[in-house]
Amino acid sequence: MKTISMLIALLYSAMLYAQSDQPTELTFATFNVSMEAENYVPRGTKGISEQVLVKELSSGKNSQIHNIAKIIKSVRPDVILLNEFDYIKDPESGVRKFISAYLADSSDGYKPLNYPYYYYSTVNTGQPTPYDLDNNGRFEQFGSDAWGFGAYPGQYGMVLLSRYPIDISKVRTFQNFKWKDMPGGLKTTKTDGTDWYAQDAWNKFPLSSKSHWDIPVKAGNKTVHILASHPTPPTFDGPEDRNGKRNHDEIRFWRDYISDHLSSYIYDDRGGKGGLNPNSSFVILGDQNASPDEGDAISGGIKSLLRHPKINTDFTPASKGGATHSPNNTFAKNHTAMWRMRADYVLPSRLGFNVIDSGVFWPEKGEPLAELVEKRESSSDHRLVWVRVRLD
């Protein structure tokens, strides 16, 4: 459970040479890239770890990862959150190898793309526990008995890439915030009304299935707080709906964090109290695993976020490919996953930005680059979502 923030020396030195230009426009994106070990080996393979991804990155030859890079290079976001990128402690074997061997590669005919700044840290997925969290009578440490579902520590991790400097000293992480400390959190009980989780387990239970990060990005003289997360899928449980309730409250965390009157209970992993400064510009990024209109989530969580007065929801990213993938579905043009739901979000604050354009990378069949999302094995089961803004 100990958070080991990657306070990379490169980022500190890079802060001294911050880009001198003042950008007038920025593109923010989120992309669940499915770059976790089970994507590259048969499901159920024993003994896997992040080293599976290390091997694929080091080869520089994985076609699926090349297609993911092509999608990113075609959109060319200034800041992008990658969900389901396994935690790899050594940046030379992980994030920097992805950048150098795939994003900065030009042999595929795409203009290379470099991100000199990045952030990642530990997550709760695959962090073993001594508890039977799924109440199946077995103490298995990993899988559903881990603090966040995962076969090994760091599975389904997150990485933020940025063209602009990151103020590492002011990053806030909430990996260890306890679910019990959220006022009015959704309680999980058995059919007889008793507590689902043993008291000792509940006292230690983190809210976040991965982590919640507040990452300040310095774009010229403007600071943008990137609020990054990846709540648990609201499925793979039973009538107690333990994952659905956790998903709801993980999403609710951001609603409270940006609310001046609701955030006083929040504490970060270094003991800092409270939420976001009221005068801050921010963008919420990530696969929220919830839709206000479809799916199994308790929709009140994502609805409360989308209705927040500080968030600009005057637009909804859309695509032709999503619309034709489910032609009889009213919401299809806004889907961000091939399994037919809006799950991934880029939500800018009203303060500091004017939205210029937005979209979901999902070309219609027959259009250029459609082969990059033709099937699950082409890239990911999710689509890259982007929003372009003009800075106030």
Image (cartoon, grey):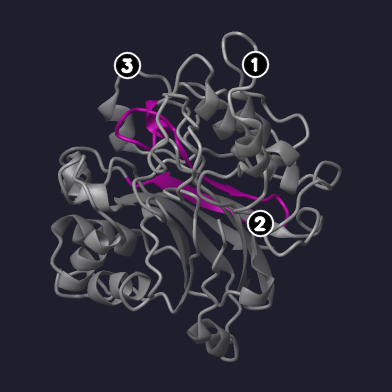
Residue type at mark 3 is: Asn
Q: Position of residue 31 (x, y in %)?
A: 39, 51
In the image, residue 367 sits, relative to residue 237, either above or below, namely below
Instruction: Pinpoint residue 92: horizontal percent, then vertical percent.
Output: 33, 78
Q: Position of residue 24 (x, y in %)?
A: 59, 70
Q: In the image, what residue type sits under mark 2?
A: Phe
* Depicted 244 relative to depicted 129: above or below: above
Numbered disc in front, either 1 or 2: 1
Relative to 376, residue 174 above or below: below
Q: Quadrant of residue 105?
A: bottom left
The answer to whether 367 appears left or right of 383 in the picture is left
Can you give x and y, in whole percent of width and height, for residue 166 in the image? 58, 74
Please state which of residues 165 and 369 is positioned toward the viewer in this rendering.
165
Residue located beneath label 3 in the image? 328
Q: Secondary structure at mark 1?
A: loop
Cα separation, mark 1 vs mark 2, equals 40 Å
Residue at 18% x, 39% y is: 375
Which residue carries the number 2 mark? 282
Give the answer, above or below, for where 283 lies relative to 265.
below
Mark linked to residue 194: 1
Nearer the observer, 359 or 40: 40
Q: Relative to the observer, which residue lies in front, 57 or 81? A: 57
Name the amino acid, label 1. Thr
Q: Secondary structure at mark 2?
A: strand
Residue 121 within the segment the image draws in magenta: no
Give the residue drawn at x 32%, y 16%.
328
Q: Where are the magenta residues, as a range? A: 332-361
Residue extending furthest toward the right = 261
Circle nearer the N terminus (1, 3): 1
Which quadrant of the view contains residue 71? Answer: bottom left
Foreground mark, 1 or 3?
Answer: 1
